[in-house]
Image (cartoon, rainbow, N blue to C red):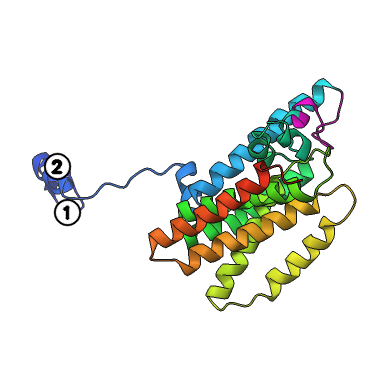
Amino acid sequence: MHPAAVGFQCPDDVRAGNAGVRQPRRTTGVRLAGRRFGPVTLVLIGLNVLVALATAVSAVTVGVDPLRSFSSPLQNALATSPAAVDAGEWWRVVTSAFEHVSPVHLALNMLALLVFGSELERQLGRVRYLTVYLVAALGGAAAIQLFAPYFQGVVGASAAIYGLLGAFGVVLVQQRQDLRGLLTLLAINLAVSFLPGISWEGHVGGLVAGALCAGVLVLARGRRALAVAGVAVLAVLLLVLVLGGLR
């Protein structure tokens, strides 16, 4: 017998009673973060941080302070440029989409990804949100291929971030929300994009591609075939611009 608040309880009765009670599930910090910010957003942040750490280590090997810059042999090997892509190194379009110039660049982009990305993941769903991210990165690569200096290496992570801002604007329009705050943020960031040493091509290309992709998904919501077809056409067009050697 077990002592209880009033009298005693039989062990068999206690076990029988507990059998019908749902036991609380243990939740790890990772699961809690995933529920709050979205698993796709956290994975994307993790990939960006891993690439940043790798380039930081590479920077140390050549005497560069990684707290100020990630400039390194690895960064150069992963960056994209019109000349490199035309030479057949198409994979740089993918690797450069997760590269950053410095810790400050990384921190600002990851903050934007956490804030806007997690909300877009909640609004659009995981697959649609990831699609916007990747199409925006591809849009930035296409603009770099068309308009950037031919031999200039570019790290393209910001293209996807700008694409998320464009997509967020589309969602706000669809929901008839106030756009003034987002437009102000975009205006400031676009102005900064035209400063020396910054790839305005990647920023603008990512912004436009992200907005177009989100527009297709929002307009085709509930019609999966139409959404897939629309995004496929957009992606193919961007791939042609990247790989078609139109310059």
- Compared with 39, 233 (above or below) is below
- Compared with 27, 118 (above or below) is below
Count the labels in the image: 2
Q: Quadrant of residue 167?
A: bottom right
Residue 59 on image: x %, y %: 80, 27
Q: Along the horizontal axis of the image, is 144 left or right of 124? A: right
- In the image, what residue type sits under mark 2? Arg
Residue 201 on image: x %, y %: 77, 52
- In the image, what residue type sits under mark 1? Val
Q: Quadrant of the C terminus?
A: top right
Residue 245 or residue 107, whichever sits in front: 245
Q: Residue at x 62, y 53 (%)?
A: 136
- Residue underneath mark 2: 15
Q: Nearer the viewer, mark 2 or mark 1?
A: 2
Q: Along the horizontal axis of the image, is 201 left or right of 112? A: right
Instruction: Write down the region rendered in magenta.
Output: 63-76
Q: Quadrant of residue 28?
A: top left
Q: Residue at x 55, y 66 (%)?
A: 215
The dominant secondary structure in magenta is: loop
Q: Would residue 37 be visible to someone looking at this image?
A: no
Q: Residue furthest top?
A: 61
Q: Residues within 10 Å of mark 1 (few under 14, many from 20)?
A: few
Disc 1 is placed on an element classified as loop
Q: Residues within 10 Å of mark 2 (few under 14, many from 20)?
A: few
Q: N-terminal of the two: label 2 or label 1?
A: 1
Q: Residue furthest right?
A: 196
Q: Along the horizontal axis of the image, is 218 left or right of 169? A: left
Q: CA distance from mark 2 to mark 1?
A: 18 Å
Marking on residue 68 = none
Q: Along the horizontal axis of the image, is 197 left or right of 31? A: right
Magenta stretch: residue 65 in it? yes
- Residue underneath mark 1: 6
